[in-house]
Amino acid sequence: MKPLKDIDSSHRSLLLKAFCICFPLLALLGYSWLGTKGIWIAAAVCVFVAFGAVALAGRIGGAAGGLYGGRRPNWNVAEQYAADLSRARVQKMTRNYIEALHTIESILNEQPGLNEAWLLKAQVLAEGFGHKLEAKNCLVRIFQTEPKHTQLYQWSATLYKEFIGAGKKDS
């Protein structure tokens, strides 16, 4: 169950509604058996009943949602960050390299193992800032974790070869 400070207003209203439904009946029973002491006991019991009712309703709702709406999609990490990567690609294409680098850095802060972001960072560093040594370091990181048969590895290798070729031409 969520801590009270993390419960949103809709959950608070459901708790209050469950309490208000439960309390009058239990307070009446408690008063008839124990007097005013019974009202306090009824209030304490109603708090637990309200939490239990809301938790049970959440479980039932989640199960019904799973039955009728299907399960949550099982997205991989790259799919979860696809929108952010797309935004960074657009920023790179529009030559907004600083914003692209900020976007990529925020992705890598959350998912440092996302090799697509490392490749994009290498491209931005090389194209936008001329930092080919830092870009090579990004590509080396990809080589260490990405399987050699993947397209991403091949793209990284091609870019790395371009950097090496450009380095020889510059000398």
Image (cartoon, grey):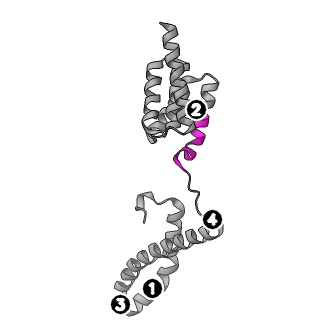
Q: In this picture, is 92 found above or below 171?
A: below
Residue drawn at the location 53% of the way across and 69% of the way down: 14
Residue position marked by numbered label 1 in the rendering:
26
Label 3: how many residues lie within 10 Å, few (<14), some (14-19) or many (20+)?
A: few
Q: Which residue is mark 2?
A: 88
Residue 143 screen position, x and y as percent: 45, 33
Please provide percent x and percent y for residue 155.
56, 31
* Cα–Cα gap, marks 2 and 1: 59 Å
Where disc 3 sits, the SS reads helix
Q: Nearer the viewer, residue 164 or 132?
A: 164
Q: Amino acid at mark 4?
A: Gly
Amino acid type indicated by mark 2: Ala
Q: Say whether residue 87 is magenta.
A: yes
Q: Main secondary structure of the magenta part?
A: helix
Write down the residue under mark 4.
70
Q: For mark 2, give the secondary structure.
A: helix
Helix, strand, or loop for circle 1? helix
Can the viewer see residue 130 in this picture? no
> Front-most of 157 and 50?
157
At label 3, the amino acid type is Leu
Toward the top, the furthest residue is 171
Number of the label disc, if any, that sits on residue 34? 3
Which of the two marks, 1 or 3, is nearer to us in this view? Answer: 1
Give the secondary structure at mark 4: loop
Q: Residue 104 at x, y = what percent?
A: 51, 33
Q: Residue 75 colored magenta?
A: no
Q: Are marks 3 and 2 in contact (CB under 8 Å)?
A: no
Q: Give, as a single range, the part of the protein colored magenta.
A: 76-88
Q: Are marks 1 and 3 in contact (CB under 8 Å)?
A: no
Q: How far is disc 4 from disc 2 in space, using C-alphas?
A: 32 Å
Residue 124 against residue 7 in the figure, above or below: above
- Between circles 4 and 3, the one closer to the viewer is 4
